[in-house]
């Protein structure tokens, strides 16, 4: 039987030996709710500007890729240089199943989750075998090998031009409404990812994540089943990234490996993590928005934007507080906050 | 027919392997001495091609242009990469890697902005024009010359590391920087030297392969990937490993191209490297020492 108990700042729910708590003190949830409300209201003012709506939708998707990535980097204690592998896997799985076998978006979602889970489970022993830089290098090679495959089997993957004409996840009849609906879907997906990642980070799982990131041997000594947790932190974020691939396929209705699998895209994700502030999953959202806004606003300058974009990012990366990023400017770090250290090369 | 194919595999294993050796030598050197995975290594190729071209375009002759380009390479390598990034972010490798990649991206796009792909670059670095045949295989003199240069440069580097005092210090640093410091090595000066040494082989390589390779602003990414694959396969920072890995990758590329289908050659090299990394974690010569 579930029992509830009201404490000063939280509601405690108990069921058997399990305990759940919900903080009711406004300072803990006021700002997230205000920001979420803002995200929900924004499209009402920009429905006539589909390019801005698309830009924010893309920013939300980037955040959806980097939130699990941040979780994965801390949970496995390794820097993943190839999160786009699962984006590609998810995208191609749903696109091919939809185009060739006529699967509906719901079934392609199920298939994407299964494929990403299976592949990530098969590859998860890499987190046991490879440490530090070697893990980063293996993960760097994997999406490039997949990209090569999309060119080799060009008749199936259409590596250069990509797959087109997949069925939309929602069709409201008018293009503007579709843009707005995709925006809201991306916001909901981002908020769900954020909520899940935050809950994991705050839970007992989160403590093990920190322990593994700090020192695997000490974590093992303290009774943490390091290998089991590393598999979880590799597989779960990979599935979430795969879902983003599915989303891209059924909203933009086009998917090309050449867009998402090369080093450039990985670099963009890595920059979002660094600029957003790797200490918190919340940091991924301002990071993604910053990178998207910057990329989009520079586009009007013509070809010089390709040069200015990395230049500005270098300046920002050097100027921002180390590791805390944009989120660090907003959120004052408390002594009790866990601040994960990312060491590529570990002893 | 099979005999001709085997001859082609053998000849091109030597040629590609030697060129790959030039491509990867600098990368392995930085990995071994500075213990840094230099993701901005591709800048060297772009600067070698476009740095020379910019001076030729300004009306200078080939040799003054090459000289000025080398000075530019040294300035970028020491001031931007070493002083600006490596020294400052040595303890924060994730920022270091991101910054080096961003600098690479910036230089590539700057080259593309000044000289778009459609403009083309024509470096007059052909030493001997024409082709000749070895058995049933026809190759160009320039290719052979590039391959022989690769072997020669590698030999000079090996002699330098094994027979000179500076080489000895660099080898000692690659084993333990702390111990070298204790024994009185001027580590900082040697790092400068290693940075300069690392730009020589890829610069020579770019100039040698320019007549028969595709010179375009994004060439650095592919060449850096090749260097990375070789460094990973050979064992990070180990020159012995790099030499063997270069010819291995050359053999894989030649073998797959001539005996199977050329479009599989990149994929085959990636898969074999991946398998080696999984089963032999540190590559062929693990240990992260230069020799």
Image: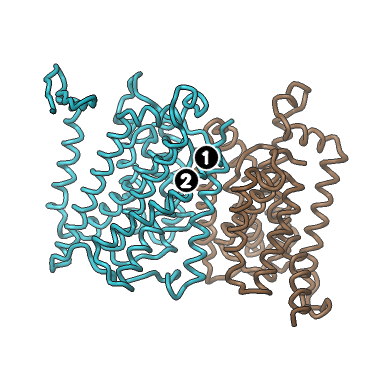
Chain colours: A cyan, B brown
Q: Quadrant of the N terminus of chain A?
A: top left
The answer to whether residue B266 is above or below residue A320 is below
Position of A230 with respect to B267 (left or right) is left
Pick the quarter of the image with the C terminus of chain A: top right
Nearer to us in this view, A3 or A252: A3
- Residue farthest along the top direction in this orientation: A8
Above or below, B242 relative to A344 = below
**Secondary structure of the residue carrying numbered label 2:** loop
> Are the residues under badges 2 and 1 in a single subunit?
yes
Location of mark 1 (residue):
A128
The image shows residue B239 at horizontal and vertical percentages of: 75, 46
The answer to whether residue A187 is above or below residue A330 is: below
As helix, strand or loop, the secondary structure at mark 1 comes to helix
Label 2 crowd bin: few (<14), some (14–19), many (20+), radius 10 Å: many
Please identify the quarter of the rendering in which residue A282 is found: top left
| Residue at the spot 42% in from the left edge and 39% down from the top edge | A274
Q: Is residue A192 visible?
A: yes
Coordinates of residue A9 in the picture (x, y in percent): 16, 20
Residue B153 placement, left or right of B251: right
Where residue B81 sits in the image (x, y, percent)?
59, 41
Q: Is residue A251 visible?
A: no
Decide: marks 2, 1 in contact (CB < 8 A)?
Answer: yes
- Residue A159 lies, in percent from the top left, at 45, 69
Residue wearing tag 2? A124
**Residue at image location 29% in from the left, 57% down from the top:** A110
Q: Is residue A65 left or right of residue B166?
A: left
Q: Residue at x 77, y 32 (%)?
A: B172
Q: Which residue occupies the extreme right position in the image?
A: B163
Q: Chain of mark 1?
A: A
- What number is the disc on residue B31? none
Label 1: how many residues lie within 10 Å, few (<14), some (14-19) or many (20+)? some
Is residue A208 left or right of B42 when viewed as pictured? left
């Amino acid at each position: 039987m579930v029992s509830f108990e009201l404490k000063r700042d939280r509601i405690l729910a108990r069921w058997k030996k399990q305990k759940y708590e919900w903080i009711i003190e406004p300072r803990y949830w006021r700002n997230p709710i205000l920001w979420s409300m803002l995200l929900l209201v924004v499209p009402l003012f920009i429905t006539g500007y589909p390019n801005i709506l698309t830009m924010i939708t893309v920013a939300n998707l980037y955040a959806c890729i980097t939130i699990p990535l941040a979780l994965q980097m801390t949970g496995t204690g390794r820097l993943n240089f190839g999160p786009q592998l699962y984006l590609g896997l998810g995208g191609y799985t749903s696109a091919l199943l939809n185009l060739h076998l006529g699967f509906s978006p719901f079934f392609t979602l199920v298939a994407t989750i299964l494929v990403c889970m299976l592949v990530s489970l098969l590859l998860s022993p890499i987190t046991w075998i490879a440490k530090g830089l070697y893990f980063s290098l293996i993960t760097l090679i994997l999406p490039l090998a997949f990209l090569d495959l999309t060119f080799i089997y060009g008749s199936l993957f259409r590596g250069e031009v990509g797959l087109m004409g997949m069925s939309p996840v929602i069709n409201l009849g008018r293009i503007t409404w579709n843009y707005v609906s995709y925006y809201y879907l991306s916001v909901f997906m981002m908020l769900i990812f954020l909520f899940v990642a935050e809950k994991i980070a705050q839970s007992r799982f989160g403590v093990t994540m920190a322990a593994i990131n700090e020192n695997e041997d000490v974590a093992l000594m303290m009774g943490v089943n390091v290998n089991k947790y590393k598999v979880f932190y590799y597989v779960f974020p990979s599935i979430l990234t795969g879902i983003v691939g599915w989303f891209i396929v059924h909203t933009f209705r086009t998917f090309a490996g050449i867009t998402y699998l090369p080093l450039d895209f990985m670099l963009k994700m890595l920059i979002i993590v660094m600029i957003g502030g790797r200490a918190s999953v919340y940091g991924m959202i301002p990071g993604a928005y910053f990178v998207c806004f910057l990329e989009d606003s520079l586009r009007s300058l013509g070809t010089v934007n390709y040069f200015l974009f990395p230049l500005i990012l270098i300046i920002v990366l050097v100027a921002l507080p180390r590791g805390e990023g944009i989120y660090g400017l907003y959120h004052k770090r408390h002594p009790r906050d866990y601040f994960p250290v990312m060491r590529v090369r570990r002893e | 027919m099979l005999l001709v194919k085997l001859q082609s595999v053998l000849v091109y294993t030597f040629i590609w392997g030697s060129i790959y050796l030039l491509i990867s030598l600098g990368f392995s050197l930085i990995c071994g001495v500075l213990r840094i995975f230099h993701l901005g290594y591709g800048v060297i190729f772009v600067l070698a091609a476009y740095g020379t071209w910019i001076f030729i375009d300004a009306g200078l002759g080939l040799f003054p242009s090459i000289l000025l380009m080398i000075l530019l390479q040294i300035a970028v390598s020491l001031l931007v990469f070493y002083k600006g990034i490596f020294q400052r972010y040595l303890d924060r490798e994730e920022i270091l890697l991101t910054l080096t990649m961003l600098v690479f991206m910036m230089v590539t796009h700057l080259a593309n902005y000044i000289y778009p792909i459609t403009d083309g670059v024509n470096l007059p670095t052909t030493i001997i024009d024409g082709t000749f045949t070895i058995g049933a295989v026809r190759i160009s003199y320039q290719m052979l010359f590039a391959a022989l240069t690769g072997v020669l440069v590698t030999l000079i580097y090996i002699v330098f590391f094994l027979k000179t005092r500076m080489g000895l210090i660099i080898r000692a640093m690659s084993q333990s920087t702390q111990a070298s410091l204790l024994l009185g090595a001027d580590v900082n000066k040697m790092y400068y030297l290693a940075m300069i040494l690392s730009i020589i082989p890829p610069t020579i390589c770019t100039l040698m392969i320019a007549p028969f390779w595709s010179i375009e602003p994004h060439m650095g990414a592919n060449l850096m990937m090749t260097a990375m694959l070789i460094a990973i396969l050979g064992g990070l920072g180990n020159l012995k490993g790099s030499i063997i890995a270069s010819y291995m990758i050359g053999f894989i590329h030649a073998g797959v191209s001539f005996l199977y289908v050329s479009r599989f050659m990149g994929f085959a090299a990636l898969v074999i490297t991946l398998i080696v990394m999984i089963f032999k974690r540190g590559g062929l010569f693990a240990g992260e020492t230069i020799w």
